[in-house]
Image (tube, grey):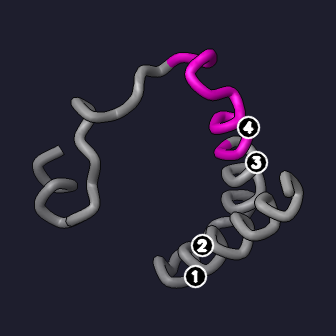
């Protein structure tokens, strides 16, 4: 956690994470599951490429729910 806090300015510490409950917001779990399924289907070595894949897939998921 010290490394993440130091190296990642936007890191959210576990003390402010929401409770790990399926009843908290089931849609969130579905969305993250879909993103994970679509983005991590192949190995990506480049952080920039990973970010662009996340943005692209987020837009795709967003279109599915709207």
Q: Is the N terminus in the top left, top right, bottom left or bottom right quadrant?
A: top left
The residue that mark 4 highlights is: 30
Q: Give percent across and percent down for residue 32.
A: 65, 45
Q: Give percent across and percent down for residue 41.
A: 75, 58
Give the extent of the magenta segment. 21-32
Report how far apart the C-alphas of labels 2 and 1 lie in the structure.
7 Å
Tell whether position 53 is magenta: no
Report how far apart the C-alphas of labels 1 and 3 lie in the structure.
18 Å
Q: Nearer the viewer, mark 1 or mark 4?
A: 4
| Secondary structure state at the residue bearing disc 1 | helix
| Sequence-wise first label, 1 or 3 | 3
The residue that mark 1 highlights is: 49
The residue that mark 2 highlights is: 44
Q: Is residue 25 left or right of residue 66?
A: left
Mark 2 and mark 1 in contact? Answer it, CB < 8 Å.
yes
| Secondary structure state at the residue bearing disc 3 | helix
Q: Nearer the viewer, mark 1 or mark 3?
A: 3
The residue that mark 3 highlights is: 34
For label 4, count other residues whose C-alpha is less than 10 Å away and answer few (under 14), some (14-19) or many (20+). few
Q: Is the C terminus in the top left, top right, bottom left or bottom right quadrant?
A: bottom right
Mark 3 and mark 2 in contact? Answer it, CB < 8 Å.
no
Mark 4 and mark 3 in contact? Answer it, CB < 8 Å.
yes
Q: Is residue 48 left or right of residue 40?
A: left
Q: Quadrant of residue 17?
A: top left
Q: Nearer the viewer, mark 2 or mark 1?
A: 1
Q: Quadrant of residue 23?
A: top right
């Amino acid at each position: 956690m010290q490394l993440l806090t130091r190296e990642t300015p936007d890191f959210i510490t576990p003390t402010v994470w929401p409770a790990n409950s399926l009843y908290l917001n089931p849609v969130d779990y579905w969305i993250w599951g879909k993103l994970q399924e679509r983005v991590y289907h192949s190995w990506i070595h480049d952080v920039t490429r990973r970010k662009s894949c996340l943005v692209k897939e987020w837009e795709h998921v967003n279109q599915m729910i709207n």
